[in-house]
Amino acid sequence: MDILRNQARAVLLLSIFCFLDSGACPRVIAQTTAPQYKVDPSWPKQLPNNWVMGQVGGLTVDRENHIWVLQRPKSDTADELGAEQTPPRSECCVAAPPILEFDAQGNLLRSLGGPHQGYDWPSSEHGIYIDKKGNIWVAGNAPVDRQVIKFSPDGKFLMQIGHPAPATQPADSASHDLLGRPSGIAVDDEAHEVFISDGYMNKRVIVFDSETGAFKRLWGAYGNTPNDADPGSYNPASAPDQQFRNPVHCVHISNDGFVYVCDRTNNRIQVFTKQGKFMKELFFRKETLGQGSVWDFAFSPDAEQKLLIVADGENNVLWILDRISGDVVSKTGHSGRNAGQFHWVHQIASDSDGNLYTGEVDNAKRIQKFVPVAGDEGKSKK
């Protein structure tokens, strides 16, 4: 029995050491069995009211396993909105409202959102989060979008952090009251804090009181003071950037209380304490150029969140990583237009049953569902 206790203690200590320094982590630690996935081509069901969806700027799953999609009506083209033209040029379609709530079967439960008096709806929707109370948080990444908005579960406006600004107004990662084209939101319900990845203009994570909107703290890459200087073109052979690159594209909080940030075009995820102390980084396909490899990710649904499922919109695949070591243990998808393939996969979320939901931008403009499968059914056919 003592031998077993000592072995268990050694594995625990080694796991902690690997979390703090993944580069020193032996590859044998990453023995988590990776799930395989298949696309559900029947999800979601046809939208009602002759609606069509635009680019998917945000996607999240709430505690009831409802899937929330933040889409961009302004991204629809004239031919996609044929029924809206004067005179109508075709039978279909009209733009759907920006927020769409689905159940796991693909039924549209409700829709809401959009411009209204009393708040500044973003010009380009980007990032949605549902907190424990069911409140709806929305961000935007257009050049004028410098705000995040909070709504009640029934869509009533509650609070706005920041405000729009002229597109010519420069980045200011030191500002406590003006955001910089924010991209993602995560709420720590117990601490009453909202974390914002900020963003396409600023280069930081910023934290506010989620009830009052009061500023709390901010930080850049490695916990440094953010610097808005242009770093130049990304070079995979160079030393790691000491600052984030635009866009700082996502922020998520793990069950064990760490803040994970997508530094998209630096091809890495950086991990911090909630106070902004740098803990580790996971580089991923450092050779990727263009729009970068780390667009968004989802934690696996197990309590330990052993895996990260990374949406890579440049290579157009989903990479399944061991969360401790960063090792790739599996992948799914391929660049293409067919079901299960991607063009600029932009957002990803998982539900408590292990299903994955993805959203695409550019001209793909769709959401997909991937179901975990076991055995031969989950293996790719040669």
Image (cartoon, rainbow, N blue to C red):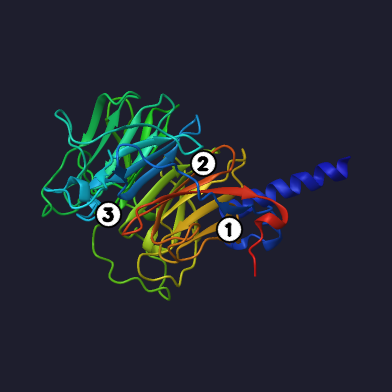
Q: Nearer the viewer, residue 273 or 119?
A: 119
The disc placed on residue 200 is 3
* Nearer mark to the viewer, of 2 and 1: 2
* Proximity of marks 3 and 1: CB atoms separated by less than 8 Å: no
Q: Label 2 is placed on what type of residue?
A: Ser
Q: Sequence order check: which comes first, mark 3 or mark 2?
A: 3
Q: Position of residue 224 (x, y in %)?
A: 35, 53
Q: Is residue 123 left or right of residue 188?
A: left
From the image, which quarter does the N terminus lie in?
Answer: top right
Give, as a three-letter code, the residue at label 3. Tyr
Disc nearer the start of the sequence (2/1): 1
The image shows residue 85, relative to residue 30, as above or below, that is above
Q: Which residue is mark 2?
A: 254
- Please state the total of marks drawn on the protein image: 3
Query: In the image shown, does 288 or 274 lie closer to the viewer?
Result: 288
Quadrant hosting residue 382: bottom right
Using a 10 Å C-alpha cutoff, classify the residue at mark 2 as few (fewer than 14 neighbours), some (14 to 19) or many (20 or more): some
> At 30% from the left edge and 41% from the top edge, which residue is drawn?
50
Cα distance in 3D space between marks 3 and 1? 28 Å
Choose the circle earlier in sequence order: 3 or 1.
1
Disc 1 marks which residue? 22
Q: CA distance from mark 3 to mark 2?
A: 23 Å
